Image (spheres, grey):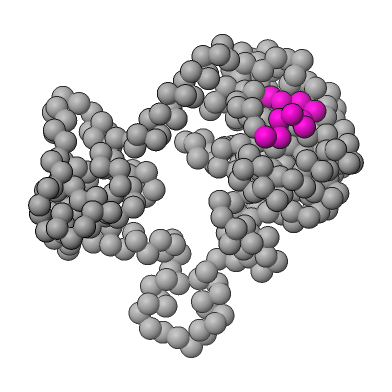
Amino acid sequence: MAYGSGAMSNTLADVAEEAAAVFLIGSNPTEQHPVFGTRLRQAVRKRRMPLVVADPRAIGLTEFAALHLRHWPGTDVALLNGLMHIILAKGWHDAQFIAQRTEDFSAWQHSLAAYTPARVSAITRVSEVELTRAASLLAHAKPMAVIWAMGITQHTSGVLNVLALANLQMLLGNVGMRGGGVNPLREQNNVQALAIWERYRRVHERLRECYPNQSTQDIEQHNREGKHDASLDGFHDYLLGSAASVRLGAKQLAESDPWNEPRRSPAVRFILLAECFQHILLLRSGQANIHPGENREHQQGKNRRPLQEEAGHDENERNILRMPDVRVEARRRQTAFLLRLV
């Protein structure tokens, strides 16, 4: 179950001032939202608010946490279901809230049967003692606020991760009260401000209100459900064959707007990629790789950088989607770090 929009159910202020405990997962507020991160630290130090951090890494708030769960990357669903399994087994759930405000609880409860502490510990590499202690801290502090960010959403199981957090808060009855709720920290300040605005709604709803008598093509086009990314209009033209050339700049379509069925455009004959990372995407399809910072002399064709050699035909097509150096180096550091966790 979820609540219908990627917005905080509470405000940053009431979480920092009134939460009896905070469960922080997949977020690093001291770097991502430093002002709010400072307020969380103050809540721990001044109000003795218990903070439970679930993150494979040590982050800025780890030293202030009552408990740090260093679960294995990608095991968020198992971790959360394991915590809920323990809460139910110990009778720490809010039975009144569940009976009055939720649906299909019995079927959902049955789905948790396999997430025993022993099995979850083997999957997540978090000890059974730590799992039980975390479940106790979260269950016995009310209101308890859940905070997360892209650390759990940017996964193939990102939707399931968020659904599990929503279920956790309903299980404990922490919905609809100050200092509780489900609270995603968004990526930029304007996005975060919209997410805590009391009139947070989809754009097409506002368009209908602002232009009730408007029937132009643009308004009608973007009133349609699902039209949330204007760049996809051009991408559809590319796939359907009505575009003969494509220019890509600072956008990696394979990651930001993936297509679930590989297709080859019947009409496109030329693709220009303007990207500071010269080996990131589609270089086999273009004729020149022009660095965005190079001068006009280079843009006119002089000193063009040669394309990388074409990948072998026996390689998987995904091998041509190469990551930038910065991310490759980050991956190396992560691998070394993960080895120390074993």
**Residue 221 shows in the view:** yes
Quadrant position of residue 149: top right
Q: Is residue 141 magenta?
A: no
Query: From the image, which quarter does the C terminus lie in?
Result: top right
Lateral position of residue 21 relative to residue 237, left or right: right
**Residue 102 shows in the view:** no
Q: Position of residue 10 (x, y in %)?
A: 75, 54
State the residue at coordinates (77%, 43%): 40
Observer-nearest residue: 2 or 258? 258
State the residue at coordinates (50%, 84%): 211
- Residues in magenta, as a range: 60-69
Quadrant position of residue 206: bottom right
Find the residue positioned furthest to the right. Answer: 47
Q: Position of residue 322 (x, y in %)?
A: 29, 35
Q: Is residue 64 magenta?
A: yes
Lateral position of residue 273 relative to residue 127, left or right: left
Observer-nearest residue: 216 or 101? 216
Observer-nearest residue: 48 or 5? 48
State the residue at coordinates (87%, 33%): 140
Q: Position of residue 178 (x, y in %)?
A: 83, 53
State the residue at coordinates (61%, 20%): 124
Q: Position of residue 199 (x, y in %)?
A: 66, 69
Lateral position of residue 267 relative to residue 89, left or right: left
Picture layout, residue 36 above or below residue 86: below
